[in-house]
Image (cartoon, rainbow, N blue to C red):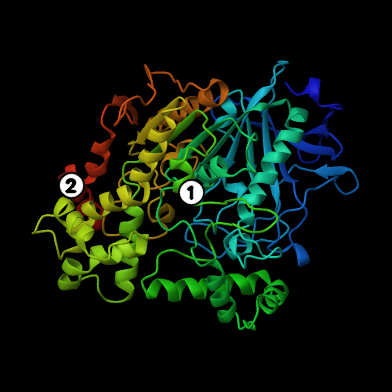
Amino acid sequence: MLSPWFGVLLVLFNITDAIIEVNVTVGQLGVATGRLDRSKWSQRQFHSFQGIPFAEPPIGSLRFAPPVKVISWKDYYLDAKNFRNICPQTKQPGYDVEGYDEDCLHLNVYVPATNGKELLPVMIWIHGGSFMSGHAQRFKPHYLMESDIILVVPQFRLGPLGLLCLGTEEIPGNVQFLDQVMAMEWVRDNIESFGGDRNRVTLSGQSSGAYSVNLHLLSPLSQGLFHRTIIQSNSVYTPGMIDRNPVKTAKEIAAVLKCNVESVERITECMKTLSAKSILEGFDKYVTVNSVNGGGSWGGNRAVIQRTGSIRFLTEEPSLLIEQGKYLKVPMIGGTTSQDGSLLASGLYDGLSSIGLLNDPNFLKDKLIPLSLKYIGVPDETGVFSQILIEKYFSSSELGDFLKMVPGLIDIGSVLIFKAGMYRMVHENSRFQPTFMYSFDYRGSQTRFGYESVKKYPFDGGVAHSDDYIYLFPFPDNLTEADTVIAKRMVQLWTSFTINGTPSADFVSEWPKMSTRAGPYLKIGTETRVGDNYFYEYTVTIHNKATSLAASLVHCLC
């Protein structure tokens, strides 16, 4: 596949470490040296190029600023055989964040080692992590390289280093998304050197990565850079994703860092001289105080609306742009996991445990749901919405007992944070383009609930948030035989859509386009089938609460 577009292609054998090297000339940038690797299941060969810089290091005067394009690689030659630095981030349960550095605007390119002459379609994967954690090293290609696509995984600035906003040219906000735009521009300009088709690019992502994909549908800066989308467990309708008072937030964070906050100039000077570690530690303190005070929407770590400035990524309210039809309408896959909202249940468990309210029946009856709405970012000044949720999701015997309330809390979190917004987005897009909706229902041997079991909870998380991408990327890679069947199915569905816009897989008779108010949609599980009413997914956990509670009991006894 590669040779017709490589310019110079050399395959070298390194006897010392048994690495088979692959060289590719990438336009005016220089020559990148990658390595030969093999896919997980069929041992199919692919070429791996890791740590390719697409922007200058965002250090010194470039910290917080829009990215600057790399024109050429130092000394013309680039060693792309290994991962480079991950972007600065605070330590999260289940994530290894050792060795971070602000010089982190790199991407990885993975290419099947085929001999065909046709350009291959491209999937760009935007990782999740609440906008503040994650890196490209975790998303390895060994499942997806079973198919004829090229996978590109970029890194981008995280947390306040990528999203702090003072509304100035020096700290405009949204640079995390501008990093992603520049990575997509790099793909447009250079992917043909790797045998990729710049006119068949699918932009995909999960969680905050999916929210980013949604924003790229809205941004004038992203137009023409991709042609299909896959959005997993997030949408522009998710509450709490926009910082409404970014300058106020930036001043509060700066104050925690003991900066002079008399003017934006003083704040800028201070924030650009502090170490990345200090900024992250200060931001962590700010988030902790904000959470204790009942705030769930983390300013300084969210998108902002930019109505002034020379570079504006997001110019209007996202939901308004959708309603006005001012977004890029492309073929789309969108969906959620069955119990995406167990993320809310675990977060509430942690928070209430820390302040001694987990076993307070009066608090759980009267204040838990209003507090949950505030934490999520859903307004409910009258309390009417809280009462509606209580009546719909809990029986009188369950109120006041946290573990008995868990199934209802999971469904509330699933609907308000993920499912309702996802439904609105895919339903809107289905009016214009082929749109395929899914619910990932497979309960496998692995789960991301409890941060890969780093944290234990006395209840079951179901098919939890992020459980779907376990079957697209090999972490962990010790899948059972049944898990592997689902992984192969997911890979076929996602890559066939990337190739031709129509998802298909072995043992899946059809995945019909969304065409009615409530469906159809694909229920991906051991017995993958088509559902006709997505609104059933809004109460799926309480409908199965007997099973769910039984599983919780088993979990507690283990």
Secondary element type, mark 2: helix
The CA span between labels 1 and 2 is 35 Å
Residue 159 horizontal/vertical position (percent): 57, 62
Whichever of labels 1 and 2 marks the residue nearer the N terminus, that label is 1
Residue type indicated by callout 2: Lys
* Count of numbered marks: 2
Tag shown at residue 318: 1
Please name whichever residue, 471 or 70, is drawn nearer the observer in this view of the structure.
Answer: 70
**Relative to residue 102, is residue 457 drawn left or right?**
left
Secondary element type, mark 1: helix
Quadrant housing residue 399: bottom left
Residue 121 horizontal/vertical position (percent): 63, 25
Please name whichever residue, 537 or 478, is drawn nearer the observer in this view of the structure.
Answer: 537
Res 168 seen here: yes
Please name whichever residue, 174 or 293, is drawn nearer the observer in this view of the structure.
Answer: 174
Residue 55 horizontal/vertical position (percent): 75, 50
Front: mark 1 or 2: 1
Quadrant housing residue 343: bottom left
Q: Residues within 10 Å of mark 1 (few under 14, many from 20)?
A: many
Name the quadrant of the C terminus.
Answer: bottom left
In the rendered view, would you say 280 is above or below 229?
A: below
